[in-house]
Each structure stands twice: as structure tokens, then as C-alpha cells.
Image (spheres, helix red, strand yellow):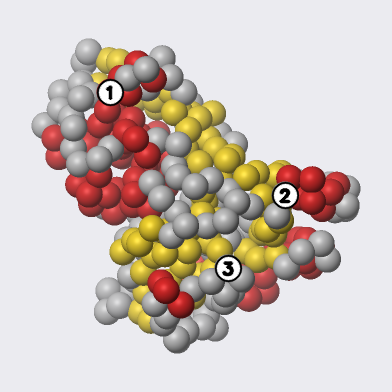
């Protein structure tokens, strides 16, 4: 089956969640952006996007999110930016089935934007190389490039300097505390630790480090602290990104399912496998 046959206008294109297996803040640039080190892992739990051709060149979002003007949605911005940089006159209607929570630290909006760039680069037959798509993605947000890069990665800078890493097969329990965390509010907190000692990619190992944003987010959102404490009773738990979601790693599906079943009633969570690659890795070269 050819790539074009497999991924076409009728396909549902996944936008997977990511976890930050560790996240250290190692400094701050003059422009205010924070310098980070992290390891990104993709999960087998995703949003799903569909695309329909338009002949008039317009970009429309058929499934707007509550409280988010369609013109501000990252998916619409991604499609229009791709049109602009490629001088493409084709249009598209975008539909999103959301499974990843907003303000959860799972990269949902960034992943959606990356899937738009990967899918439309293919469907519009633009043939832009992966590196160019990563550059376009960086204009939309610091987490977008890794989803286009398509491999689990050790990341530096503001998250755009990426080295592929091989990770062992694992399963994860991910909990969704009932809060939305604004990334800017956590990074802007005066008490945030910003002086972690940098390491090289070779020095990282599974279980290394922590999440420097976790203490700030947990102090400001008690629900995050509560979910961390409950999940940690089953296996060491961490927050991903700037929150609010927290996760724990397990060697197998059965252990993960058992841990999820032991959590208090009313906790929202799910189990997913860690992926080796982004499902759309083959759409760019």
C-alpha cells in the first residue's frame, strides 16, 4: 500500500499526547523564554483530525472549542501559515475529535497543529521537508516541532533542539485533575527554580530528574498535589509539562490497569502505551 493510499482525504489523522519524562529549567533568555531540558515521549492516546478539500482557498474549523475563537485556534493558524509560506491556494475544512484536555500538559494543541502541518503538507502535495515543517511549527509554539520531528526525543533550548532517544516499551497511567493550568502563569512564577544544572543527552537515563514546574503548579492547584499523592502510592508519579496531568510508568498493561482501578472514585484517568514513533512519521522526510 502506498503512502498516498494509506493517508488520504478520507483518513482520520492522529495527534498523539506527549509526556515530559523529566523537565528541568536551566536558564532564561533575554527575551523571557525559558531554557529547558526534557525528554518527550509520545503516547498511544490522541486527538483525531479529519480534513475536507475546499476549492475557495478558505481555512475553516468545523469543530470550534468552547471559548476559543476559530481564528485563534492553533489548527487554523497552522493551516494558514502553511498556505502563506508555500503560496498554496488550496483550502480546507478541519474537524477535530478532542480526547486530550486543554491545560493538561499533554501537548494537545501543539500536537493538533503539528498534525495539520504534516497532513496538509501531504494532502496539498507541497513536499516540504521535515526540517522546514519544524521551523514553521516553531512559529506556532515551542512544543510543535517535536511532534513533526516524529521521534521520542531529548530536547533543549526552548524545546526545539531535538535528539532522538530510544525508550523501552512501557505503559502509563495518566490522570486528569479537574483544573486547567495556564503555562505562562507557571513559568512566570517568581518561586520557579530556573538554575538546574544542564546535562547531555548521554547522561539522561529513565527515572532521572524531576519536573521543575511541578512544585509551583501543585502549590497553586491543590488538585494536582492530591492526584500526585494518590498515584504515587502505586508507582512514582510526576506531572507532565506545566500541568495539570500527572502520570506514572509501568512495565506492562496489567500493572497499569490495576493501578488505575485502585484510585479513588471520581478520579479521571486512562492507560496508554508509550510509542516508539509518531504515527505520522512517514508523512515527511
**What is the spatial separation of the Cα atoms under label 2 and label 1, in whole angstroms?**
37 Å
Q: Quadrant of residue 100?
A: top right
Q: Tell which circle, 3 or 2, labels the residue nearer the N-terminal end.
A: 3
Q: Is residue 56 above or below residue 72?
A: above
Q: Residue, x 57% and y 74% (percent of image)? A: 208
- The answer to whether residue 95 shows anywhere in this view is no
Residue receiving disc 2? 252
Q: Is residue 194 left or right of residue 180?
A: left
Question: How many neighbours does mark 2 have within 10 angstroms: few (below 14), some (14-19), or many (20 or more)?
Answer: few
Q: Secondary structure at mark 3?
A: loop
**What is the spatial separation of the Cα atoms under label 3 and label 2, in whole angstroms?**
16 Å
> For residue 56, which numbered disc appears in the image?
none
> Could you tell me residue 146's position as x and y percent?
38, 53
Q: Is residue 31 above or below residue 118?
A: below
Q: Tell which circle, 2 or 1, labels the residue nearer the N-terminal end.
A: 1
> For residue 123, which numbered disc appears in the image?
1
Residue receiving disc 3? 206
Q: Secondary structure at mark 1?
A: helix
Image quarter where the N terminus lies is: top left
Q: Is residue 262 left or right of residue 213?
A: right
Mark in front: 3 vs 1 = 3
Q: Quadrant of residue 141?
A: bottom left
Q: Is residue 145 left or right of residue 99?
A: left
Amino acid at each position: 500500500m502506498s503512502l498516498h493510499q494509506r493517508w488520504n482525504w478520507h483518513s482520520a489523522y492522529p495527534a498523539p499526547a506527549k509526556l515530559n519524562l523529566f523537565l528541568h529549567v536551566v536558564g532564561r533568555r533575554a527575551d523571557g523564554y525559558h531554557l529547558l531540558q526534557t525528554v518527550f515521549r509520545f503516547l498511544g492516546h490522541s486527538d483525531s483530525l479529519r480534513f475536507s478539500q475546499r476549492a475557495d482557498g478558505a481555512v475553516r474549523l468545523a469543530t470550534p472549542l468552547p471559548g476559543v475563537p476559530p481564528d485563534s485556534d492553533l489548527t487554523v493558524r497552522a493551516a494558514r501559515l502553511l498556505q502563506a509560506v508555500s503560496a498554496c491556494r488550496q483550502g480546507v475544512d478541519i474537524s477535530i475529535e478532542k480526547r486530550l484536555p486543554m491545560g493538561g500538559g499533554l501537548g494537545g494543541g501543539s500536537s493538533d497543529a503539528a498534525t495539520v502541518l504534516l497532513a496538509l503538507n501531504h494532502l496539498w502535495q507541497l513536499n516540504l521537508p521535515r526540517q522546514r515543517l519544524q521551523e514553521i511549527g516553531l512559529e506556532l509554539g515551542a512544543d510543535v516541532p517535536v511532534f513533526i520531528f516524529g521521534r521520542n526525543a531529548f530536547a533543549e533550548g526552548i524545546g526545539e533542539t531535538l535528539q532522538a532517544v530510544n525508550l523501552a516499551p512501557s505503559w502509563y497511567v495518566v490522570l486528569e485533575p479537574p483544573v486547567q493550568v495556564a503555562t505562562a502563569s507557571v513559568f512566570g512564577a517568581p518561586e520557579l527554580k530556573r538554575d538546574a544544572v544542564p546535562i547531555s543527552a548521554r547522561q539522561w537515563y529513565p527515572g532521572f530528574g524531576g519536573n521543575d514546574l511541578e512544585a509551583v503548579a501543585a502549590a497553586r492547584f491543590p488538585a494536582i498535589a492530591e492526584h500526585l499523592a494518590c498515584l504515587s502510592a502505586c508507582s512514582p508519579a510526576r506531572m507532565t509539562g506545566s500541568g495539570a496531568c500527572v502520570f506514572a510508568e509501568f512495565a506492562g498493561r496489567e500493572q497499569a490497569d490495576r493501578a488505575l482501578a485502585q484510585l479513588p472514585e471520581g478520579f479521571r484517568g486512562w492507560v496508554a502505551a508509550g510509542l516508539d514513533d509518531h504515527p505520522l512519521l512517514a508523512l515527511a522526510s
